[in-house]
C-alpha cells in the first residue's frame, strides 16, 4: 500500500512484534497502534519514516531502548510511547524532532537524567515523563519552553525545581512522589537549603508521600461515610461577590471570529460551545443556545439561575451572559484541558491511578456541595464524563446544568420528563422520571466504574441483560475484578501492584454501594 497515509489499529487485541515492513510504507503520516498487546522492540526501519506526523504506541508490551534515531522524525508533532516497558535513557538527540508538540513516555522503566537537549524543542507543549526511574535534576533551561502540560511525578529526581518561565503555571501534582525535590512552597516541597542535605530531604519526601496516600484514602472513606449517614462534607466556599455581568453580542462575535468553526469547542443537544477572547484579553467559553429547539429557552433560564447562585472550586463558574429575544448565551470559565471523556477514551491522552482518584474526589466534593452545602439542594441530573471539565492544573469542574433541578420547597423528589444520558441514569429516573439527589449519587457510581474499567456504560458488550454495574458486580463476586480493571492502571510487573489492586478494589466496592 504505497500511498497509505494513516494506519489506525488501536484498541484491538493484536499480539505480535510491530511488522518491520511498516518502514517501507514511506507515505505514512500517522500510525496509531495503542492499546493492543504488541511485544518485542520497535523495529529499526520504523525510524526511517521521517515524514511521520503522529506515532502512538501507548499501552502495549513493547520493550528495549528508545533509539537515538528518534531524532530522525523531523516533522513529528505527537509521540506517545506511554504504558510500555521501555528502559534505558531518553535519547539526547530528541532535539532532532523540531516540530514536536506532544511527548508522552510515562509509565515505563526509563532511567538516567532528563536530557538538556529538550531546551531545543521550542514548540513542545506537552511533556509527560511520569512513572519512570529518572534521576538527577530538572534541567533549568526547560523554563524557556512554552510548555502547557508538564508531569515528572513518580520518579527519582532531586534538588531544585525551576520557578521561572512556564514553571510558574504548573502545580504540585506535576512534581509529586520524587526522591528529594525542593523549591517554591506552591509545589508542596521543602524550601531548598543552602547546602544539599540529600539524606534529610529524602526522609522528608518519603514521609510526605506516605502522608499524601493516607489523606487520599481518608478522603475516599469519608465521602463514602457521608453518603451513608447523609452528613455534609465541610467545604470552603468563596463568598458570592463576583459581579454577574452582561456582555454584548458584538463583543462575542468579535471574540469568536464570528462564531467560526475554528473556535468551536463542541456541540450538544442545547447548541454549541465556542472559545472566545473578550476585549479585556480574558479567554472564556461561550455556550450558545439554539433557540429553535423546543425547551432550550427554559434550559437557559435554569442554568442561568443555578450557576449565578453557586460558587465552588469544583463547579464551572459563570462569568456573564448575552441575552435578547433572538440570542442567548452563557459566558463560562474556559477549561483548557477539555473533558474527562477525552482523557478516558482517547489514545492521545492518559490518566494514572492517582489522577483518577483525585478527579473522583473533585466530582464528589462538587456533588456534596450541590446536595448539602447550598441553601437548597440542587440535583445536577446528568453526571457523565463529558460534563467533567479540567482547568490548567487538571482540577475537575462539574459543568452543564441545563436540566438540573432546584429543590427550593422542601421537596425530596421531583417528577420530570427531561431525560438524562442513557447508561448513567438511575432506574427510577429512567422509568418514572423521578429526580432526587440519590439519582446523582447513582450516576457518580457509574462514573467511577467507567473511570477505573475504561468501559463506557453504552459499550457494545452491554445490553438489556447485562450492564456495566452488573459486569463489575459479577467480577467482584467471582474474585476476578483484576480482569475488568483498566489495563493501563494495573500491570503485574508494577512494583506497587498489590497496593494499586487493593485501592481499585476499594473504589469498585464504593461505586457499587452508592
Image: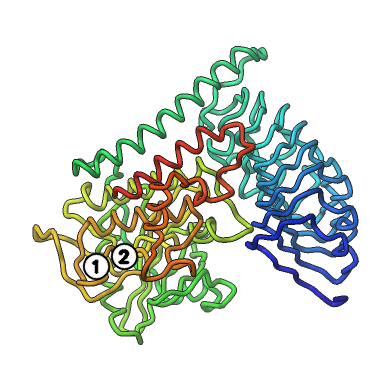
Instruction: Estimate the spatial distance between the alpha carbons at disc 1 and disc 2, rounded to whole Å.
Output: 6 Å
Viewed as shown, does residue 192 lie left or right of 504? right
Closer to the camera in the image, 237 or 357 = 357
Asked if 338 appears above or below 6 in the picture, the reply is: above
Q: Which mark is residue 429?
A: 1
Viewed as shown, does residue 283 lie left or right of 122? left
**Badge 2 density bin: few <14, some 14–19, many ≥20, Cα 10 Å:** many
Q: Secondary structure at mark 1?
A: helix
Q: Position of residue 88 (x, y in %)?
A: 80, 36
Circles 1 and 2: CB distance less than 8 Å? yes
Residue at horizontal 48 percent and vertical 66 percent from the top: 461
The answer to whether residue 316 is visible is no
Q: Which mark is residue 425?
A: 2
Asked if 7 appears above or below 181 in the picture, the reply is: below
The outermost residue toward the bottom is 292
Residue at horizontal 47 percent and vertical 74 percent from the top: 267
The quadrant holding residue 38 is bottom right
Amino acid at each position: 500500500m504505497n500511498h497509505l497515509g494513516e494506519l489506525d489499529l488501536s484498541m484491538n487485541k493484536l499480539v505480535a512484534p510491530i511488522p518491520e515492513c511498516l518502514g517501507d510504507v514511506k507515505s505514512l503520516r500517522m500510525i496509531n497502534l495503542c492499546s493492543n498487546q504488541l511485544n518485542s522492540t520497535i523495529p529499526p526501519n520504523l525510524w526511517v519514516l521521517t515524514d511521520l506526523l503522529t506515532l502512538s504506541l501507548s499501552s502495549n508490551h513493547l520493550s528495549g531502548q528508545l533509539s537515538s534515531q528518534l531524532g530522525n522524525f523531523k516533522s513529528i508533532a505527537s509521540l506517545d510511547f506511554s504504558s510500555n516497558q521501555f528502559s534505558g535513557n531518553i535519547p539526547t538527540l530528541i532535539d532532532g524532532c523540531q516540530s514536536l508538540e506532544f511527548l508522552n513516555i510515562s509509565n515505563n522503566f526509563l532511567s538516567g537524567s532528563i536530557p538538556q537537549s529538550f531546551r531545543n524543542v521550542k514548540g513542545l507543549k506537552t511533556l509527560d515523563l511520569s512513572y519512570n526511574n529518572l534521576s538527577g535534576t530538572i534541567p533549568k533551561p526547560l523554563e524557556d519552553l512554552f510548555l502547557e502540560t508538564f508531569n515528572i511525578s513518580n520518579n527519582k529526581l532531586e534538588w531544585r525545581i525551576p520557578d521561572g518561565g512556564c514553571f510558574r503555571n504548573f502545580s504540585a501534582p506535576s512534581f509529586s512522589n520524587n526522591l528529594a525535590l525542593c523549591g517554591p512552597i506552591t509545589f508542596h516541597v521543602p524550601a531548598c537549603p543552602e547546602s544539599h542535605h540529600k539524606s534529610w530531604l529524602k526522609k522528608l519526601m518519603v514521609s510526605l508521600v506516605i502522608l499524601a496516600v493516607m489523606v487520599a484514602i481518608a478522603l475516599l472513606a469519608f465521602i463514602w461515610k457521608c453518603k451513608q449517614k447523609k452528613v455534609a462534607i465541610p467545604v470552603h466556599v468563596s463568598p458570592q461577590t463576583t459581579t454577574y455581568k452582561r456582555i454584548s453580542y458584538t463583543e462575542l462575535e468579535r471574540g469568536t471570529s464570528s462564531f467560526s468553526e475554528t473556535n468551536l469547542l463542541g456541540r450538544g443537544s442545547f447548541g454549541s460551545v465556542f472559545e472566545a477572547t473578550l476585549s479585556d484579553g480574558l479567554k472564556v467559553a461561550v455556550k450558545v443556545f439554539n433557540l429553535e429547539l423546543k425547551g432550550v429557552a427554559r434550559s437557559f433560564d435554569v442554568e442561568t439561575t443555578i450557576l449565578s447562585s453557586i460558587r465552588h472550586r469544583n463547579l464551572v463558574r459563570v462569568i456573564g451572559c448575552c441575552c435578547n429575544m433572538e440570542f442567548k448565551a452563557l459566558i463560562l470559565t474556559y477549561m483548557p484541558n477539555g473533558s474527562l471523556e477525552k482523557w478516558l477514551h482517547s489514545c492521545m491522552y492518559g490518566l494514572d491511578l492517582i489522577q483518577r482518584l483525585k478527579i473522583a474526589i473533585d466530582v464528589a466534593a462538587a456533588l456534596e456541595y450541590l446536595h448539602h452545602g447550598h441553601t437548597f439542594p440542587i440535583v445536577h441530573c446528568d453526571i457523565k464524563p463529558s460534563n467533567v471539565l479540567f482547568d490548567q492544573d487538571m482540577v475537575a469542574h462539574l459543568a452543564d446544568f441545563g436540566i438540573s433541578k432546584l429543590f427550593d420547597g422542601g421537596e425530596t423528589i421531583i417528577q420530570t420528563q427531561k431525560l438524562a444520558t442513557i447508561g448513567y441514569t438511575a432506574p427510577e429516573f429512567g422509568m418514572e422520571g423521578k429526580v432526587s439527589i440519590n439519582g446523582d449519587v447513582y450516576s457518580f457510581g457509574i462514573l467511577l466504574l467507567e473511570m477505573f474499567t475504561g468501559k463506557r456504560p453504552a459499550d457494545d458488550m452491554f445490553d438489556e441483560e447485562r450492564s456495566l454495574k452488573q459486569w463489575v458486580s459479577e467480577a467482584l463476586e467471582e474474585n476476578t475484578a483484576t480482569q475488568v480493571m483498566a489495563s493501563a492502571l494495573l500491570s503485574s510487573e508494577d512494583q506497587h501492584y498489590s497496593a494499586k489492586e487493593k485501592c481499585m478494589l476499594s473504589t469498585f466496592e464504593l461505586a457499587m454501594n452508592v
